[in-house]
Amino acid sequence: MSSIELKPTDRRLKGDLSVPGDKSISHRSVIFSALAEGTSVITNFLTGEDCLRTVEAFRLMGVNIEQEGNKITVHGKGISHLSEPSQPINFGNSGTTARLMSGVLAGLPLFTTVYGDESLSKRPMDRVIQPLRMMGAEIHGREGDSLLPLAFRGKKLAGTRHELTVKSAQVKSALLLAGLLAEGETEVIELGETRNHTEMLLPEFGVDLHVEGRSIKIRGGQKPSASNIKVPGDISSAAFFLVAASIVPGSELVIRDVGLNPTRDGIVKALIDMGANIEVQVHTHIGSEPVGDIVVRHSRLNGMTLEGELIPNVIDEIPILALAATQAEGETIIKDAEELRYKETDRIEAVVETLSKLGADIQAREDGMVIQGGTPLNGGTIDSYGDHRIGMMGAIASLICDKEVIVKNKECINISYPSFFEDLNQVLN
Ligand code: SPQ
């Protein structure tokens, strides 16, 4: 495990930046391409560790996948040609791989076993296992079949109507993938809106879906066809720079080609509500995903209450938003965010501990946190706890600390943003 020492700096963020490809879309692109018949080329693919776990899973199932930098070529042979892996599949730290692949593995006529790292082995899997069982899936795992490692005896599933009890794009996507492999129709009714990349991207692979309000219907037995996908920049990665430029005096940054899907842009909405100086220009669509440039300048921020429907839209950005809140005027309250407790770490505890160590006035609540703004931050030694978003939040915090910040266990940042420190250094002037 390695640490990074970040000295106090008076540098500002200036210039232009492109962040790596979107993690959620990269996972889905490779899954759909591997199920399709024909060759799909994915460009601007995120080569972070999580997405490479999904690539490796399909390689173990006999799919030829070539990688050249951030271009991935998937030679799909169709669903019926996927073969039984001869060894357990390692999903590493990746919740998205674990949940989405569960939907796939449950519905293929193969026996597979899967495992993950210490963090993934603690994350709840019953949220996908229970509804998959309603479709006839046979899945076994630790702790009453709720935790990895898991074993799948895949079989023909039956299309089923699911009313979700958790706001989760991963659960929704797992069930839609199982529905694609099932006999008959599957309907997923969401509890609240979550990121809709699965619904946006499957049609690009020739799969029909019917979306009406919170209901998504998919007909089983459809055969996906190959497609070429360009992955937009990841707004969750851009978020670190949106907050950095907002809180570091004198900053002005343009972040290019960021995915601006309305189910993902909550960080922009929340920062604008706090008074951030942000301009967004949607200039194109990649497939059906809106993409644009974001201009962000330093500004005074105000505290706010973040709750309800906006939470799933900003869920992965709450750690970095909490840092912004420490610099805002007044109080920020984050509620309805208990899902944060089931991420790579318990992100409520991890954010509160990390920012408290740096001198912030922040209290945990069962479903969120309360932050008193206007607090100068000192340096200190913090730990990423193996969570990429906590590690990056700590590194951005160092830009406004008056003493050195040491971030322990920094390598987890490679999970979603391998070029994070290079990109940060590039824009610090
Ligand atoms: O893949 P993983 O580890 O679950 O990644 C995280 C992240 O911070 O990158 C969450 F820890 O993002 C999830 C996100 O929180 C990615 C995701 C997706 O691609 O469908 C959906 C969200 O999770 P959920 O549980 O709300 O569906």
Image: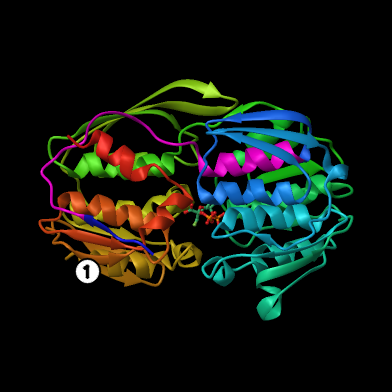
Say whether residue 188 is visible.
Answer: no
User: Where does the C terminus fall, quadrant-wise?
Assistant: top left
Mark 1 neighbour density, 10 Å: few (under 14) some (14–19) many (20 or more): some
Q: Which one is in front, 414 or 241?
A: 414
Q: Give the range drawn in magenta.
A: 6-34
Vertical arrangement, residue 19 with respect to residue 379, above or below: above
In the rendered image, residue 32 lying in the magenta stretch gets the answer yes
> What percent of the width, then of the height, locates residue 263?
50, 41
Q: How many marks?
A: 1
> What percent of the width, then of the height, locates residue 425?
26, 39
Residue drawn at the location 67% of the way across and 52% of the way down? 100
Say whether residue 386 is visible.
Answer: yes
> What percent of the width, then of the height, locates residue 43?
57, 29
Residue 359: name its quadrant. Answer: bottom left
> What percent of the width, then of the height, locates residue 300?
15, 42
Would residue 231 appear left or right of 220 to someone viewing this image? left
Element under disc 1: helix
Residue drawn at the location 16% of the way across and 53% of the way down? 7
Q: Which residue lies furthest to the top in this view?
A: 283
Vertical arrangement, residue 320 with respect to residue 367, above or below: above
User: Where does the N terminus fall, quadrant-wise?
Assistant: bottom left
Would residue 262 appear left or right of 280 to someone viewing this image? right
**Scheme of colours in the image:** rainbow
Residue 336: name its quadrant. Answer: bottom left
In the rendered image, residue 160 lying in the magenta stretch gets the answer no
Q: Which one is in front, 276 or 335?
A: 276
Q: What amino acid is found at the position of numbered circle 1 in the picture?
A: Lys
Residue drawn at the location 70% of the way across and 79% of the way down? 144
Q: Which residue lies furthest to the bottom in this view?
A: 143
Residue 254: name its quadrant. Answer: top left
Residue identifier under label 1: 357
